[in-house]
Structure formats: structure tokens, C-alpha cells
Image (cartoon, helix red, strand yellow):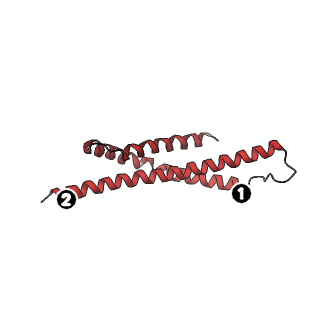
Amino acid sequence: MALQWMILTYVVAAEAAIAFLLTLPSPKALKSTLVSLISLILQPSMFIVPFAGFQLLDIYWKNEHRLMCSGETCTAAERDRYEKSIFKAQRNVILCFSACLLYWCIYRVCKYHKEIQSMEEVEKRP
């Protein structure tokens, strides 16, 4: 069950690294090469959005059908396990939202860079 969360964690780390590289100031030739390379990668990596959405639905379903541990019927170990599962679910929700948000940020930065390049080309043509 933890494999999908490890995959999502690595994808979020890769997206964060790509977003960092895209926002670093760099020479124009290097930046345009980097943006074109990342633009090619964006289309196949779109799978992360439905994957994260499915994981969010899974978290919601598990949260709705989770056994509640409240009152004096629970032992300390059961209460700890319940709280740990709640914390894991919250961490995973943050992971899913950050995956989608980082993908969107990378997409927008690439799109803005392409628009700026096209405007510069129009400006150069007299």
C-alpha cells in the first residue's frame, strides 16, 4: 500500500526540482533549451493529476469508513494507532495537492516562457 505514496513522493520531489530549475535565472539559450525539454516531458507526466485525484478519493473513502476511536473503550495503543493513521492521511492529502499544484506551476511557467519568446520574435520582426 505504501508504494503509491513513495511514487508520489518521488514525483513531487522531481517536480519541485524542475520548478526550482525553471525559476532560476539562467542564460537565454539554456533557459529555452530547458523549457523545451520540460515541455516535452509535461504531456506524459500529466498522469500525476488523475493519480493524485484517485489517491485523494481513496483517502476520503478510508476516512469515511474508518473505525472511530473515541471514548473510554479504546486502549492507549488503539488511540495511538488511530491518531497515527489520521496524521498519515493528512500528510498524504498534502502530498496529493502539492503534486497537482507543482505540475500546474511548471505548466504555467513553461507556457509563460513560450509566450514571452513569441512576443520577442514578433518584436524583432520589423
The x and y percentages for residue 77 are: 81, 41
- The crowding category of the residue bearing disc 2, from other C-alpha atoms within 10 Å (few below 14, some 14 to 19, many at least 20), is few
Side of 123 where 36 appears, left or right: right
The x and y percentages for residue 102 are: 47, 50
- The crowding category of the residue bearing disc 1, from other C-alpha atoms within 10 Å (few below 14, some 14 to 19, many at least 20), is few
Residue at 44% in and 41% down: 17
The x and y percentages for residue 30 are: 28, 41
Element class at badge 1: helix
Amino acid identity at mark 1: Glu
Image quadrant in which the C terminus is located = bottom left
Residue at 76% in and 44% down: 80
- Upstream in sequence: badge 1 or badge 2: 1
For disc 2, the marked residue is 122
Question: Outermost residue toward the right?
Answer: 73
Amino acid identity at mark 2: Val
The x and y percentages for residue 68 are: 78, 53
Residue at 57% in and 40% down: 6
Side of 105 where 79 appears, left or right: right
- Say whether marks 1 and 2 touch (CB < 8 Å): no
In front of the other: label 1 or label 2?
2
For disc 1, the marked residue is 64
Q: Nearer the viewer, residue 41 or 113?
A: 113
Element class at badge 2: helix
Separation of residues labelled 1 and 2 (CA atoms): 55 Å
